Image (cartoon, rainbow, N blue to C red):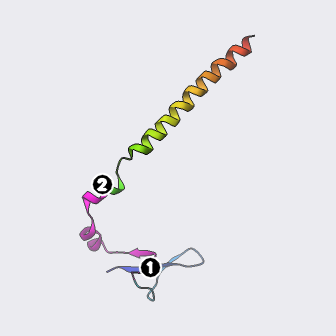
Amino acid sequence: MASCVAVTPDNFLMLDPVSSPDTCPFLIITAADYAANLNVNQLFTEYLAFDTTLFVTLTGGFLLSFVTGHVLGKILAGLRRV
């Protein structure tokens, strides 16, 4: 059985008997409900999915930053010797 949880102004959690589970922002569910609704395929395909676009963007940014820093370091080291 899902129960609605409300956040008090003091940042405490309390059960909210007035709200319905459809309009409630936070729910507490039982372990049996969680086990019944757990879909392993959905867990791996949606939540732990590998985003190739994000990977390529981050890897390219890291590589560009490394190469730029390395070249700039070599230039500054060469200017320091002069």
Identify the disc placed on residue 45: 2
Who's the residue at 35% across and 52% down the image? 48
Q: Residues within 10 Å of mark 1 (few under 14, many from 20)?
A: some
Residue 22 is inside the magenta segment: yes
Return the disc, 1 or 2, that comes first in the chain's sequence: 1
Above/below status of 67 relative to 20: above
Dividing the image into 4 quarters, which one contains the N terminus? bottom left
Relative placement, left or right, of 14 versus 10 is: left
Q: CA distance from mark 1 to mark 2?
A: 26 Å
Looking at the rendered structure, the kind of residue marked 1 is: Cys
Front residue (pair 32, 42): 42
Q: Position of residue 25 (x, y in %)?
A: 46, 75
Tally the marks. 2
- At which x and y percent is residue 63? 51, 31
Tell whether label 2 touches label 1 (CB within 8 Å): no
Residue under circle 1?
Answer: 24
Q: Residue at x 43, y 81 (%)?
A: 23
Q: Amino acid at mark 2?
A: Thr
Front disc: 1 or 2:
2
SS at mark 1 in the image? loop
Q: Which residues are magenta?
A: 21-43
Q: Is residue 82 above or below residue 2?
A: above
Q: Residue at x 59, y 23 (%)?
A: 70
Q: Quadrant of residue 64?
A: top right
Q: Residue at the bottom extreme?
A: 18
Which of the 4 image quadrants contains residue 8? bottom right
Provide residue 43's location: percent of width, then percent of height. Answer: 30, 58
Q: Is residue 66 left or right of residue 21?
A: right
- Near-viewer residue (37 or 68): 68
Q: Is residue 41 left or right of residue 21?
A: left
Of helix, strand and loop, which one carries label 2?
A: helix
Quadrant where the image shows the C terminus? top right
